[in-house]
Amino acid sequence: MCGLSRRGEGGERRLATSKQEDGPQTEPITAELRWAAISRLKMEAALSQDRTQDPFAGNVASSVHVAGHPIHVMLVTFPIALVCATLGADLFYWWSADPFFVRVGLWTSGWGFAMGVAAAASGTAELLLVRGIRRSAEPWSHAVAAMMLLSVIGANWGLRLLEGASAVLPWGLFLSVLGLVFVGLAGWHGGKLVFEHQIGVEGSKD
């Protein structure tokens, strides 16, 4: 009987020891799972809050397009290129005094203004027709910069029409440089709208 009781006590001790050894091993797993669940809930709450605070939430796809291609994005490349070409013509005229570059500057500034008006019209239509675009401040900043650019291009072209070669230096060159500055400013804001906020990209915010 004593042997049986001793063996029974030994078995109870081994069972208690095994429970003590198993206990600390299960607690870290439970704590890690609990921490992961809490972290996931916090992340989901933060994401849902960001979606509700996103001014571009909802549909911001282009409403003025041809076969899914936004007209404004296609048109803005022309005034950008023509503003750069006008500045190049002015610099070549300053360097060479060749009247050919005066005519080049006149044509590039004139077509730059015309294509700028077309791009501005399509961009204004996007701004006013798409609620997801017009309710944020950033598209309006782009629009203001674009209007200032268009004003500079128009003034540059009008000055050349009225005064000819004498308009190139110094004011024509100054307006060409100023136009390039506004190209960079408007392009910066426009690039943020497309690449960061996916404005004009079909199905981007669905």
Image: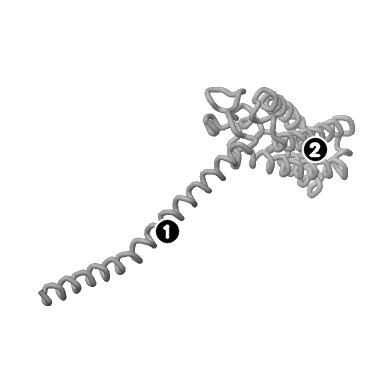
Looking at the picture, how far across and down is residue 100, in whole percent? 77, 38
Q: Residue at x 16, y 70 (%)?
A: 8
Q: Residue at x 22, y 69 (%)?
A: 12
Residue underneath mark 1 = 31
Q: Is mark 1 on a helix, strand or loop?
A: helix
Crowd rating for badge 2 (residues with CA inside 10 Å; few <14, some 14–19, many 20+):
many
Mark 2 vs 1: CB contact within 8 A:
no
Which residue type carries mark 1? Ala
Residue 19: name its quadrant. Answer: bottom left
Residue 99: name its quadrant. Answer: top right
Could you say which is closer to the camera, residue 60 or residue 89? 60
Residue underneath mark 2 = 102
Q: Considering only vertical position in the picture, is 110 above or below 183?
A: above
Q: Which residue is drawn at 55% across and 40% down?
A: 48
Question: Quick one: label 2 or label 1, which is nearer the N terminus?
Answer: 1
- Position of the N terminus, as image quadrant, is bottom left
Which residue type carries mark 2? Val
Q: In this view, does 38 lie to the left or right of 178?
A: left
